[in-house]
Image: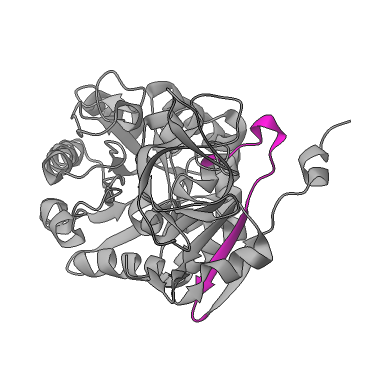
């Protein structure tokens, strides 16, 4: 990532000083590079230039309004996983016809909202959901655009907690059941079946499972055509991984080459739902050292004012994030357990990390935190949600102020 570099002894984002930002905003704080987001979107869009495609940004990765508005200006559409994400997308300026609605447990209120708005497609998860949408649409005298989400039982070779396309996962309809359900959906007057959907999971770095899923969906599209359905798109979901440890990241050109020709052969449009690959490398989380301690027979601990309330991925998935001092000091390195302030042993951000000399008050940057960071943050231990800053086109601005204690308790009586 060239957007985060060291110059004059300290870390910079798009040549804006991180220490300068921290002096004004405090810690913990998320800092995002607008140029990194622009570059990632442009690279993926260019790789798919030869095919009819739409990139529906997955809000679950990061749904901060300023990030959504930036992506919308770049040409992105939206992928929402809840009624709340639909509302955020609308407030960011997305038209309902630019929103696909995905989710394994959509409530009646959420389905009513999606049907009333006329979203681009509701990705159907089950026979029962198809019936409920049909009932809601007929009650309104409309036809709801829907796509059937299928589960192809393909192992994406990712962490078990973020695998979504295998038989034992809760998502979608088993692909062998899909032809029967498509026939039933075709007979329902409230449903306009416009597409098919598959999503294997997240942080996928191998192209072969993604190509297999595309082939499975293309085959099902041919069966759908044979029963008289006029589909418009195949939605291959998202899941393209990034590099957290410095290893080569999946290449958008390889990704496009693996899936686009398969969809082109069907004559249908290609929809993708990228999230992590667009915003993950574009964000860092900056915390401050609150304490350093080491006693005989125990590890050396670096305790930050930042922990699993700000970035839960290490505690939840055992995820690795690179870490560096914002302003490194010269000297011999030592090994630390990098931990947060929460009353949980799982509040550990990094095991056996090497740092040069550090002192209480020093700032530490946690890299590749732009996806599934702020979106999964919490108020555990009554901690306030952190601030967020966007650096773009030579300036920076606070795009989410730090939560106050009044904010934290506003809804309580």
Q: Residue at x 52, y 61 (%)?
A: 31
Quarter of the rendering containing residue 90? bottom right
Horizontal arrangement in the rendering, residue 7 relative to residue 26 (left or right): left
Residue 128: percent from left, percent from top: 44, 21
Specify the quadrant that holds the N terminus. Answer: bottom left
Total marks shown come to 0
Residue placed furthest toward the front = 296
In the rendered structure, which segment of residues is drawn in magenta? 376-394
In the image shown, does 154 or 247 lie closer to the viewer? 247
Residue 258: percent from left, percent from top: 12, 52
Q: Residue at x 59, y 58 (%)?
A: 388
In the image shown, does 267 or 295 lie closer to the viewer? 295
Q: Is residue 264 above or below residue 374?
A: below
Residue 21: percent from left, percent from top: 59, 68
Residue placed furthest toward the right = 413
Specify the quadrant that holds the C terminus. Answer: top right
In the image shown, does 226 or 255 lie closer to the viewer? 255
């Amino acid at each position: 990532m060239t957007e985060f570099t060291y110059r004059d002894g300290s870390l910079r984002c798009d040549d804006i000083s991180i220490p300068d930002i921290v002096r004004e905003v405090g810690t913990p704080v998320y800092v995002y590079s607008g140029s990194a987001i622009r570059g990632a979107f442009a690279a993926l869009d260019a790789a798919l230039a030869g095919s009819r495609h739409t990139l529906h940004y997955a809000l679950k990765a990061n749904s901060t309004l300023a990030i959504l508005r930036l992506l919308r200006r770049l040409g992105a559409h939206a992928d929402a996983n809840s009624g709340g994400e639909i509302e955020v997308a609308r407030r960011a300026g997305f038209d309902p016809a630019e929103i696909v609605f995905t989710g394994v447990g959509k409530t009646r209120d959420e389905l009513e909202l999606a049907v009333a708005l006329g979203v681009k497609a509701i990705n159907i998860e089950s026979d029962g959901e198809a019936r409920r949408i049909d009932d809601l649409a007929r009650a309104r005298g409309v036809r709801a655009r829907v796509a059937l989400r299928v589960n192809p039982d393909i192992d994406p070779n990712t962490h078990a907690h973020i695998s979504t396309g295998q038989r034992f996962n809760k998502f979608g309809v088993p692909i062998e059941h899909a032809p029967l359900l498509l026939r039933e959906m075709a007979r329902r007057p409230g449903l306009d079946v416009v597409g098919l959907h598959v999503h294997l999971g997240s942080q996928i770095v191998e192209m072969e499972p993604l190509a297999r899923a595309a082939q499975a969906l293309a085959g099902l599209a041919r069966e759908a055509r044979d029963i008289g359905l006029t589909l418009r798109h195949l939605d291959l979901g998202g899941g393209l991984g990034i590099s957290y440890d410095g290893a080569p990241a999946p290449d958008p050109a390889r990704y496009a080459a693996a899936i686009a020709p398969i969809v082109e052969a069907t004559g249908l449009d290609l929809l993708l739902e990228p999230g992590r690959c667009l915003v993950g490398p574009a964000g860092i989380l900056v915390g401050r050292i609150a304490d350093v301690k080491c006693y005989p027979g125990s590890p050396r601990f670096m305790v930050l004012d930042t922990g699993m309330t700000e970035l839960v991925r290490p505690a939840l998935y055992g995820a690795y994030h690179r870490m560096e001092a914002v302003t490194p000091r010269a000297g011999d390195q030592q090994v630390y357990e990098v931990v947060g302030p929460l009353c949980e042993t799982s509040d550990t951000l990094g095991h056996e990390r090497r740092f040069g000399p550090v002192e209480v008050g020093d700032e530490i940057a946690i890299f590749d935190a732009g996806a599934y960071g702020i979106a999964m943050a919490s108020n555990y231990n009554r901690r306030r949600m952190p601030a967020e800053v966007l650096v773009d086109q030579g300036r920076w601005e606070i795009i989410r102020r730090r939560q106050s204690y009044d904010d934290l308790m506003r809804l309580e009586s």
